[in-house]
């Protein structure tokens, strides 16, 4: 009778040990996932703040025009665009070879 009780208790202790180990492993995984989600949330909040700042900047018509001119080479009707290339950055278009 004592041997059966010891065997049952041993099996129960082993089963509970496995369950505790499983819960600890799952807890560690969830902690890692939570930290990852927190990082993504912080990045998303930063991105949202940057976009809001850019939206407010571009809400000013002067700033919007400045950005259109710089990003898309926008010119008003009647204006001419001049592109200045710094020295040393241009390459010759073609080279001729004489026989």
Image (cartoon, helix red, strand yellow):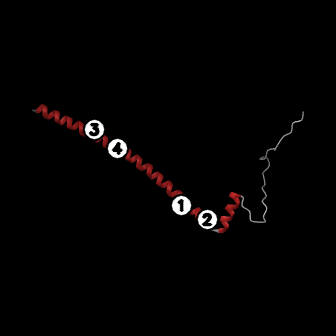
Q: Is residue 72 left or right of residue 51?
A: right
| Residue underneath mark 3 | 18
- Lower position in the chain sequence, tag 2 or tag 1: 1
Q: What mark, if any, has residue 72 been given in the picture?
A: none
Q: Is residue 90 above or below residue 14?
A: below
- Secondary structure of the residue carrying numbered label 1: helix
| Residue underneath mark 1 | 49
Quarter of the image where one finds residue 9:
top left
- Lower position in the chain sequence, tag 3 or tag 1: 3
Q: Position of residue 92 (x, y in %)?
A: 82, 44
- Lower position in the chain sequence, tag 1 or tag 4: 4
Pointers 2 and 4 in contact (C-beta within 8 Å): no
Q: Is residue 47 left or right of residue 16?
A: right
- Secondary structure of the residue carrying numbered label 3: helix
Residue at screen point 59% across, 66% down = 56
Q: Position of residue 36 (x, y in %)?
A: 44, 49
Quarter of the image where one finds residue 76:
bottom right
Q: Is residue 8 above or below residue 36?
A: above
- Lower position in the chain sequence, tag 4 or tag 3: 3
Separation (CA) of disc 3 from disc 1: 46 Å
| Residue underneath mark 2 | 57
| Residue underneath mark 4 | 26
Separation (CA) of disc 2 from disc 4: 46 Å
Pointers 2 and 1 in contact (C-beta within 8 Å): no
Q: Position of residue 46 (x, y in %)?
A: 52, 57
| Quarter that holds the N terminus | top left
Residue in front for this viewpoint, 43 or 67 = 67
């Amino acid at each position: 009778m004592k041997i059966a009780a010891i065997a049952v208790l041993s099996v129960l202790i082993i089963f509970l040990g496995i369950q505790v180990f499983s819960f600890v492993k799952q807890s560690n995984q969830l902690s890692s996932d939570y930290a990852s989600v927190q990082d993504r949330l912080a990045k998303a909040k930063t991105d949202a703040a940057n976009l809001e700042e850019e939206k407010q900047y571009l809400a000013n018509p002067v700033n919007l025009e400045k950005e259109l001119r710089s990003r898309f080479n926008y010119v008003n009707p009647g204006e001419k665009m001049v592109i200045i290339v710094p020295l040393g950055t241009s390459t010759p278009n073609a080279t001729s070879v004489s026989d």
